[in-house]
Image: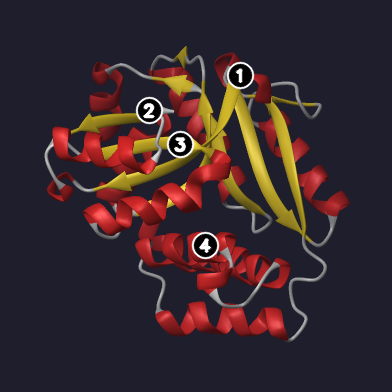
Amino acid sequence: MAGHSKWANIQHRKGRQDAARSKLFSKLAKEITVAAKMGDPDPDKNPRLRLAVKEAKSQSVPKDVIDRAIKKSMGGEGDDYEEIRYEGYGPGGVAVIVEAMTDNRNRTASTVRSTFGKHGGNLGETGSVSFMFERKGEIIYKPDAGDEDTVMMAAIEAGAEDVEHSDEGHTIYCADTDLNEVSNALEAELGESETAKLIWKPQTTTELDLDGVTKLMKLIDVLEDDDDVQRVTANFEVSDEVMEQLSA
């Protein structure tokens, strides 16, 4: 997971995310529409919608885009979307989880399977790799949210399970079912977080060399470029030396 996060940072520094900004906005808007359709259109009364809106705001999605996405749910849009999880192995034997939201299961399954095959991977059955991950809530704060002790105490009092600190900020983990409650409690103590979302947290990782991570990221890039795919998680790790070569 650390590898995937570091790769995202490299993409951001190189400006690669700019070209895919409209696609990212579209995926986030879809999540908002579906979340609003499944519950209440008021984020204060709908935990999933509140988290979806928070994630959209963290990615600088304009308020009017968020508002339109919520209104779409009231007009019946989002009825046909189905949430599906695909699991498989990428290059180097890395476990990959693909979360999709689609109105055509056959189309999405065919595309995902083909993408795995073309990029050195193999799509497996549901459950084939998810046992290597834990479903967790992840809340991220920037470094200026407080020192390590302050954030740790706030996390403990909020009911979190673990906290990781780095130069890039504080990452707080909690049970998936507690995400909304823990996020609200932390917000009262530390202010609004940078992101708060459900993730698949790897229990083990596979280390890749430069060739392996390059091939894997090609697979992930193509998967994430699919309109039906919401997010991709992989349990790989890379050394600082390899990351320096990638970011050069």
User: Which marked residue is nearer to the observer: mark 2 or mark 1?
Assistant: 1
Q: Residues within 10 Å of mark 1 (few under 14, many from 20)?
A: some
Residue 145, given in percent of the width and then of the height, sits at 17, 49
Of pointers 3 and 2, the one earlier in the residue sequence: 2
Q: Are marks 3 and 4 in contact (CB under 8 Å)?
A: no
Outermost residue to the right: 106
- How much space separates mark 1 and mark 3, taking CA atoms? 17 Å
Using the image, tell me which numbered label, if any, was put on residue 52.
4
Specify the label residue 174 is tagged with.
3
Q: Position of residue 180 (x, y in %)?
A: 49, 53
Amino acid type assigned to the residue bearing label 4 in the image? Ala
Mark nearer the N terminus (2 vs 1): 2
Q: Nearer the viewer, mark 1 or mark 3?
A: 3
- Name the one closer to the observer, 123 or 74: 74
Q: Amino acid at mark 3?
A: Cys
Residue at left 30%, top 42%? 9
Q: Amino acid at mark 2?
A: Ala
> Rounded to the nearest whole Å, what is the CA distance between mark 3 and mark 2?
18 Å
Image side of residue 193 versus residue 232, left or right: left
Q: Which residue is mark 2?
A: 2
> Mark 3 and mark 4: span between their CA atoms?
17 Å
Can you say whether 201 is above or below 209 in the image? below
Residue in the foreground of this view, choosing between 244 and 40: 40
- Residue designated by label 1: 132
CA–CA distance in space, label 4 to label 2: 23 Å
Which sits earlier in the primary sequence, circle 3 or circle 4?
Answer: 4
Q: Amino acid at mark 1?
A: Met
Badge 3: residue crowd in 10 Å (few <14, some 14–19, many ≥20)? many
Contact between marks 1 and 3 (CB within 8 A): the answer is no
Please tell me whether mark 2 sits on a helix, a strand or a loop: helix
